[in-house]
Image (cartoon, rainbow, N blue to C red):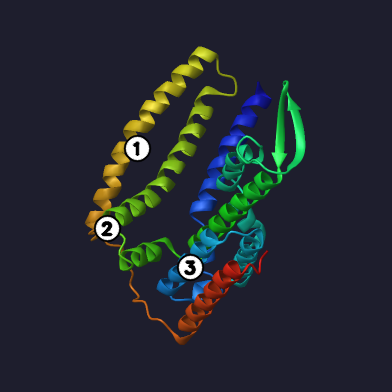
Amino acid sequence: MSKRNNFIRRSLMGVLSFLKESVFADEYAAKKGFLQSLDPRIKIITFILFILAILFTQSMAGSLYLYAVCLILAYLSRVSIGFFLKRTWIFIPLFSLFIAIPALFSVFSPGEPLLSLNMAGVQLIITRPGLWGAALFVTRVIASVSFAVLLSLTTKHFVLLKVLRILGIPQIFVMTMGMCYRYIYLFVEMIENTYTAVKSRSGVNIHYPRGQRVVAWNIAYLWVRSCQLNEEVYKAMLSRGYSGEPAVLNDFKAKPKDWLWLSAVLAMFAVNRLAEIWGIYG
């Protein structure tokens, strides 16, 4: 029982720690790296171009090329590659891998067979077009997620929200994102503190009926407290002058470096599209 409880505790604390590190890694946005030095408006526009290039690419080589560009940008921005890979190869890419599995088989992707599997009396055939299509889909998802994560790591969240408003994103969406960002951290802390409180009052071993009552009571308590906290956070923001628009003290000012970077990305986007059209990637 002790080992089981320790496993649950380690799993819960690990998930909470991973969530906090993933969402609130503002220390990378404060570093003096390449992307951090760019004007946020120019940076977001160029990242949109990168993601569009990934969506338009129909070749594995094009996706891997853009992914390599993303890794280089992460290195130049002083983002730990290990930290970056852990944040980009979990959840969404793995989920996309499971989605792409059915496309491997001849039922959905007929073509030249590569491998035949016999599972529970059912013959499954993996085809070359299916394998190629699934691999292309997964690499495109990984590359797109990597650029999105890199943008969030190298841009402070309130700056990102202000740029979204400048680019014409409706205020209600930006306000909702800002509220969620602030509330998630408080909610994670609340869960962690509640779990610690339950363990300190109940000890190591908890009988099953009592454990059910404790869990049910804490679910109800967390629901009520989260509603109250939501209202308190909103009132606190209003009392500090929040009007629905993210406030940033410094106005954005594009430098020659920013325009040079935008020109380089536009040229890269054009070259990538021409390579796709001419079949240079194969």
Residue on which the image places disc 2: 171
Residue on which the image places disc 1: 226
Say which label, 3 or 2, has the lower sequence index. Answer: 3
| For residue 98, above or below residue 168 | above
Q: Which labelled disc corresponds to residue 37?
A: none
- Type of residue at label 1? Ser
**Residue 35 x/y as whole percent:** 52, 72
The reply to whether residue 32 is in sight is no
**Residue 79 x/y as whole percent:** 60, 65
Give the residue displayed 63% in from the left and 69% down from the top: 72
- Type of residue at label 2? Gln
The alpha-carbon separation of the residues under discs 3 and 2 comes to 23 Å
Mark 2 or 1, closer to the camera: 2
- Type of residue at label 3? Leu
Image side of residue 118 versus residue 53, left or right: right
Closer to us: 203 or 119: 119
Residue on which the image places disc 3: 49
Q: Residues within 10 Å of mark 2 (few under 14, many from 20)?
A: some
